[in-house]
Image (cartoon, rainbow, N blue to C red):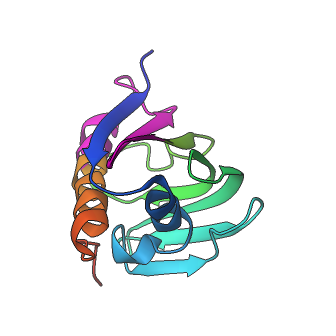
Amino acid sequence: MDNYTHTFEVKATADKVYDALTRTIPLWWTEMFSGSSEQAGDVFTIRFGENIHKTMRVKELLPNSKVIWYVEDSRIVLPELKNQTEWIGTTIIWETEQDGNRVLVTVTHVGLHPAVECYEICSGGWLQFTNSLKVFLETGKGNPYKE
């Protein structure tokens, strides 16, 4: 199965992208953030209202090139989903590559593939929030989920 992968270009530096993925997640993904994401072993939870949450452990950090999160807990309470815990046990890999005055950012969600029930909803969510990340990196103001 092909895992969800999305690559986009951003006018920024790799260290700025790394900072966004480790220190400023609430500014582009969701303001409902708790925990820490700055060091390997850290655990953080993101929420999208009362019905959706994901708890992730930082598995690996390679400054300015790679960030890996492992999803330890998740619930996506939407009426159209029978399996609301599909993210549990999946891995999210962020890779960055500096190319002049731009960075290529690739997010791969290992375990999120077309056979997964939430694939369409979740891949749409990834596009929404990677676009927010891009805007945040280029303008300083993202479009995170707000409670």
In which quarter of the view is residue 1 placed?
Answer: top left
Q: Check the image and name the residue furthest to the front.
A: 100
Percent x, y of residue 143:
22, 71
Identity of the residue drawn at 72% across and 65% down:
39
Q: What residue is rendered at 51% in x and 60% in y?
A: 15
Q: Residue furthest top?
A: 1
At a point 34% along the width and 57% down the height, the residue shown is 12
Question: What is the span of residues highlighted in magenta in the rendered image?
Answer: 97-124
- Which quarter of the rendering shows the C terminus? bottom left
Residue 49 appears in the picture as rendered: no
Measured from the top left, where is residue 122 in percent x and y? Answer: 32, 45
> How many labels sit on residues?
0
Location of residue 114 by image quarter: top left
**Left or right of 58 on screen, residue 86:** left
In the picture shown, does residue 43 fall above or below 58? Answer: below
Q: Is residue 100 magenta?
A: yes
Front residue of 51 and 79: 51
- In this view, the residue in front, 118 or 111, is 111
Q: Nearer the viewer, residue 121 or 4?
A: 4
Report the residue at 68% width, 57% height from top: 58
**Residue 74 vertical placement versus 45 (above, below):** above
Q: Judge by depth and name the residue closer to the eye, 36 or 66.
A: 66
List x then y, in percent, for residue 116: 40, 30
Looking at the picture, does residue 21 appear above or below residue 31? above
Residue 88 drawn in magenta: no
Q: Can you see residue 55?
A: yes
Residue 16 at x, y percent in the picture: 45, 63
Q: Residue furthest bottom?
A: 147
Determine whether, in the image, residue 41 is placed left or right of residue 5.
right
Query: Quadrant location of residue 117?
Result: top left
74 left or right of 112 in image: right
